[in-house]
Structure formats: structure tokens, C-alpha cells
Image (cartoon, grey):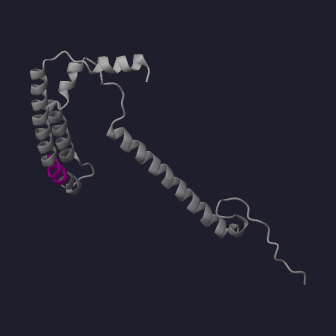
Amino acid sequence: MSDSVENATAEEATVDVTKSEMVRDAIVFQIKLIVDGLRDFILIPVSLIATGISLFKPGAKSGSEFYEVVAFGRRTEKAINLFGAADRLGRDDDHDDPDLDSLVSDVESYVRREAQGERFEAARDRIERALGLRGARGKNGKNAPADTDKTDA
């Protein structure tokens, strides 16, 4: 590692707080972790119940119960401010790091593209079989070798 990288890392780790302030922040962080965990523990069944209510509610549009639970979760997440002690570093860590929603969206898009590709392949195979072309193509879609097992009669 170069000296400039080591110096930058050492500078980033330096925070202008006393040890007693750091201990206080550590204790507050532990309390926030407990509160956040309890909130999550409660939100799991509540969100499932709200989803069920939203799904079985009559009408074409539903979901308000579920999204109200999600909105409550967002409000409490901001109130808990679990990682607020990181502000002491004086850095702006709110850049465009990918979040779990982005990751799920990317995976979902990939799965949909793959599923559409499989449907396309299955449809092409059915069409080829119906047209009698299946023997002319191998499984990889390339032309199969010509039939050399012909006998002269």
C-alpha cells in the first residue's frame, strides 16, 4: 500500500471526540440497535397481516394497509437514526451506493429476461416440431449434421 493511501486511511479514522464521548456513542448505538431490532420484530407480522388485509379487501385497487405499515417503518427508521454517530466523521456518505431495493430490482429484471428467453426457446422448439424442422436443428440451435445413414436400394 502506498504512503498516501495509508495516510488517507489514518486521517479518515481520526475523529475529534473524547473517549467518554465515544463510549456514550457506543452505548447509544447499542440501544438504537435493540430498538431497531424490536421495531423490525414487530413490523414483520404486522406487515404480513396488513398484506393479507390488502389482498383480500374488495375492489380492484388495494394495498393501502401494507403501504401505511411501510410508511410507518420509514418514519421510525428516520427517528431511530441508527447510524447517526457516523456524522462525527464529517464525511458525506450519502452518495449513490446501491441499496437492497436496487439489488432486488436488478435480480428481478435478470430473472424476467431469462424467463422470457426460455419462453422464446420453448416457443421456437414447438414451432420447429410442428413444421417438422426439429431434426434439422440440434439443441443448441445450430444445424445438425446431415443424415449419412442412407442406404442405396
| Drawn side of residue 97 relative to residue 120, left or right | left
Q: Which quadrant holds the N terminus?
A: top left
Q: Position of residue 32 (x, y in %)?
A: 12, 35
Q: Which quadrant holds the C terminus?
A: bottom right
Please tell me whether residue 122 is drawn above or below residue 99 in the rendered image: below
Please tell me whether residue 32 is drawn above or below residue 130 in the rendered image: above
- Front position in the image: 44 or 25: 25
Q: Position of residue 105 (x, y in %)?
A: 39, 43
Secondary structure that dominates the magenta span: helix
Instruction: Name which quarter of the figure residue 22 lies in.
Output: top left
Q: Does the stretch in magenta take in 44?
A: yes
Q: Position of residue 12 (x, y in %)?
A: 30, 19
- Front position in the image: 23 or 99: 23
Magenta segment boundaries in residue numbering: 43-49
Instruction: Name which quarter of the figure residue 121 lies in.
Output: bottom right
Instruction: Name which quarter of the figure residue 142 lies in.
Output: bottom right
Residue at 34% of width from left, 21% of height from top? 9
Q: Furthest residue to the right? A: 153
Q: Position of residue 101 (x, y in %)?
A: 33, 40
